[in-house]
């Protein structure tokens, strides 16, 4: 049992670190996200078991981090210019689920930028029974510079525009996410794609 020493005395229980699957940003990589998170305080990092995964698709265009980090670069899915259509999203979710089966169990998901958009949609897809049904329930989320599918985003003329949603997660945000989540948003983020923001 956790916390038992076998000597008949009682010591503080050994707490298991939460294991988080880490999803990097658009046209970056698992190594890049790992480097980015190295700036977090050691007191935070030592409490987490972080597992970094590369997206399944090589970047189809220029990476915004080319001057900062070496290739290769990857992306989780592709989208139309108006953000209304998404491509290869279902394949990505199947890829993530397969990784979670092989390397889990995972307690939660950490996602940055495009990875954050995916992470935000995962509990809803799981609770709706449309994806991630073969892995344990997601208990925690950490979203860094993420957003949601199907909401609003500022357009070039200052008005709110709307973005679409992949079919698989069309109802992911129809009810409140029922797991604790930490959201980290900065004022200047490299490659913060204009995914939707939830309106108050």
Image: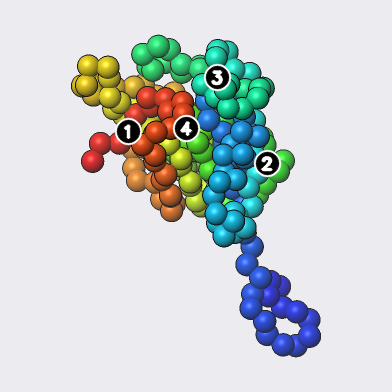
Q: Is residue 66 visible?
A: yes
Q: CA distance from mark 3 to mark 4?
A: 13 Å
Residue 111 x, y percent position in the rendering: 51, 38
Confirm or deny contact between disc 1 and disc 3 (CB under 8 A): no
For residue 94, the mark is none
Q: Residue 85 at x, y = what percent?
A: 42, 15
Mark 1 or mark 3: name the one nearer the start of the chain.
Answer: 3
Q: Looking at the image, which residue sits at the far bottom?
A: 8
Q: Position of residue 196 (x, y in %)?
A: 34, 29
Total tally of numbered discs in the picture: 4
Judged from the image, the secondary structure of the residue bearing numbered disc 4 is loop
| Mark earlier in primary sequence (3, 2) | 3
Disc 2 crowd, CA 10 A, few/some/many (<14, 14-19, 20+): some
Q: What mark, if any, has residue 63 been given in the picture? A: 3
103 left or right of 24 in image: right
Secondary structure of the residue carrying tag 1 is: loop
Rate crowding at label 4 as few (under 14), some (14 to 19) or many (20 or more) other CA atoms within 10 Å. many
Q: Nearer the viewer, mark 2 or mark 4?
A: 4
- Label 1 vs label 3: CA separation? 23 Å
Which mark lies nearer to you, 1 or 3?
Answer: 3
Badge number at residue 113? 4
Q: Which mark is residue 101?
A: 2
Disc 1 target residue: 197
Quarter of the image where the N terminus is located? bottom right
């Amino acid at each position: 049992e956790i916390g038992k020493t076998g000597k008949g005395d009682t010591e503080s229980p050994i707490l298991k670190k939460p294991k988080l699957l880490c999803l990097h940003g658009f046209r970056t990589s698992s190594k890049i996200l790992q480097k980015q998170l190295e700036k977090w305080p050691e007191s935070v990092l030592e409490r987490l078991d972080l597992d970094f995964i590369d997206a399944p698709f090589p970047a189809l265009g220029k990476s915004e981090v080319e001057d900062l980090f070496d290739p290769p670069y990857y992306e989780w899915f592709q989208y139309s210019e108006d953000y209304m259509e998404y491509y290869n999203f279902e394949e990505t979710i199947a890829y993530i689920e397969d990784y979670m089966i092989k390397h889990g169990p995972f307690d939660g998901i950490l996602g940055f930028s495009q990875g954050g958009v995916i992470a935000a949609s995962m509990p809803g897809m799981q609770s709706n029974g449309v994806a991630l049904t073969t892995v344990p329930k997601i208990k925690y989320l950490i979203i860094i510079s993420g957003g949601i599918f199907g909401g609003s985003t500022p357009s070039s003329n200052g008005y709110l525009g709307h973005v679409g949603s992949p079919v698989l997660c069309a109802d992911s945000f129809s009810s409140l996410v029922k797991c604790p989540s930490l959201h980290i948003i900065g004022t200047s983020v490299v490659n913060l794609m204009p995914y939707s923001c939830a309106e108050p």
